[in-house]
Image (tube, rainbow, N blue to C red):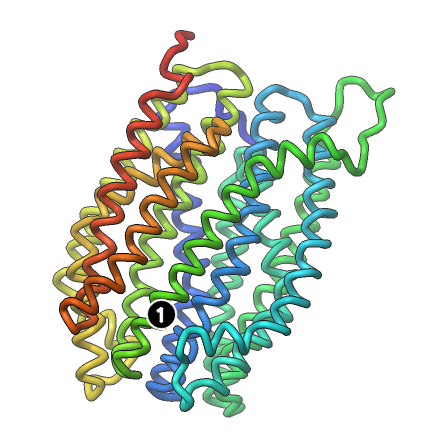
Amino acid sequence: MNKDLTKGDPRKVLWAFCLPMFGSIIFQQLYNIADSLVAGKFIGENALAAVGNSYNITLIFIAFAFGCNMGCSVIVSQLFGAKDYGRMKTSVYTTLIASAVLCALLMFAGFLSCGTLLRLMKTQPEIMADSALYLNIYILGLPFLFFYNIATGIFSALGDSKTPFLFLAFSSTANILVDILFVVTFQMGIAGVAWATFLCQGVSCTLSVLLILKRLAKIEISDTTVKTAVFSWDLLGKILTVAIPSILQQSFISIGNILVQGCINSFGVSVAAGYSAAVKLNNLVITSFTTIGNGISNFSAQNIGAKTYGRVKDGFRAGVKLVWMLSIPLCLLYLFLGKYLLLLFMDASSVKALQTGQQFLRILSPFYFLISAKLAADGVLRGAGAMKQFMVSTFTDLILRVALAFVLSAAMQSETGIWLSWPVGWCLGTALSILFYRKGYWNCHRN
């Protein structure tokens, strides 16, 4: 059901909107976690390392899908808040057409370059074949990834966070079962892991896109004499204003991860396997905070479209309280029970991998309070279209983290230096995001 986020108590409205989004991302991450879990438990340490190794390249494709999601979502939110339903529908159709073209180009580039990227990451020979196989199947499923992300962005823009949650709950649960079926029963190895994701995401994508088109058809336009355009260059430009910085942000993070992965791989397969498991657990948290930040973006965009600026500030404060409430149990969980979570991905005999994963989680988890506040502030910046400030904060964090990963690991002659680079980048990035939020024009208006 569509929901107007410009009315009602801001805290209650935002929390009711964001909590299903948080549940959705938990199930979304189960796709990747299930792949690593099944690969590590039922195939072996090399398979776990291969999935983790490939994951950094898949993040590049996810970056483009995420950018399309954000570009469409922010503009649709603003138009929905302004009750401009005709242009809102056109923005959706424009995004679908432009994304189809972009997806085709990325598939072509992906098939040509995945081998080069794997070599750039210094992929060990024993996991090269499995990494390449997993990637090639993943690239075949890019249309499902793109259109599913766009559909969830539109649902969120219309104030509906529950429908994507229901789709994900079903498809991610099915993915775990199909993973086990293909790998354990059919003995398909790493290919079974990839095909399970392809199949389940394809079903979820098809159903969500059909429902979005049906939902849009029910929204009535006041001026029935005006025909809704299928494509608009003007709206495409507005969408790209938000999408391109988001794509660049996620793409450079992915490229940075590829460079860092090369540094990690130099310490051996066991370290790479431990990192592969631990980073999935870390990404579960970071992606959850990012998704709540996206909810804050939708909330901010609708209220900026309706010119109710005071609600933007109220929404930010409510968002920070929400992510901090989530940070406490997650931090404690990883600090004290991280070992047992890592054992879901590997056997106790993988001593070095287990030690690596524990160390990674213990260093990063206390700083979840900082990074969650940054992502909440980034949500307001994106919703307001303040993309320059968003980019400055994000790239400062990224560049510092990548540079320090190489400097500290070389100085310490240990992978520990790589893990220490994360908190330093997060600290500076958070300071910049909060500063930009406080200087935003929405803080200068009174309702």
Give percent across and percent down for residue 249: 45, 47
Q: Height in image: 388 above or below 108? A: above
**Type of the residue with mark 1:** Gln
Query: What residue do we see at 38% from left, 66% from top?
Result: 259
Left or right relative to 411: residue 139: right
Front residue of 275 and 407 = 407
Residue 184 visible in image: yes
Left or right relative to 378: residue 367: left
Other residues around mark 1 within 10 Å, as few (<14) / some (14–19) / many (≥20): many
Residue 70 quadrant: top right
- Which residue is outermost to the right? 225
Query: What residue do we see at 54% from left, 83% from top?
Result: 191
Give percent across and percent down for residue 194: 53, 76
- Which residue is outermost to the top? 446
Reading the image, the residue beneath label 1 is: 261
Give percent across and percent down for residue 274: 26, 75
Residue 95 quadrant: top right
Query: What residue do we see at 16% from left, 67% from top?
Result: 411
The quadrant in which the N terminus is found is top right
Front residue of 83 and 231 = 231
The quadrant in which the C terminus is found is top left
The mark tally for this picture is 1
Identify the element where label 1 is drawn. helix
Q: Height in image: 361 above or below 216? A: below
Front residue of 385 and 109 = 109
Q: Height in image: 220 above or below 215? A: above
Give percent across and percent down for residue 270: 26, 82
Left or right relative to 124: residue 359: left
Query: What residue do we see at 55% from left, 37% from top?
Result: 242
Residue 199 visible in image: no
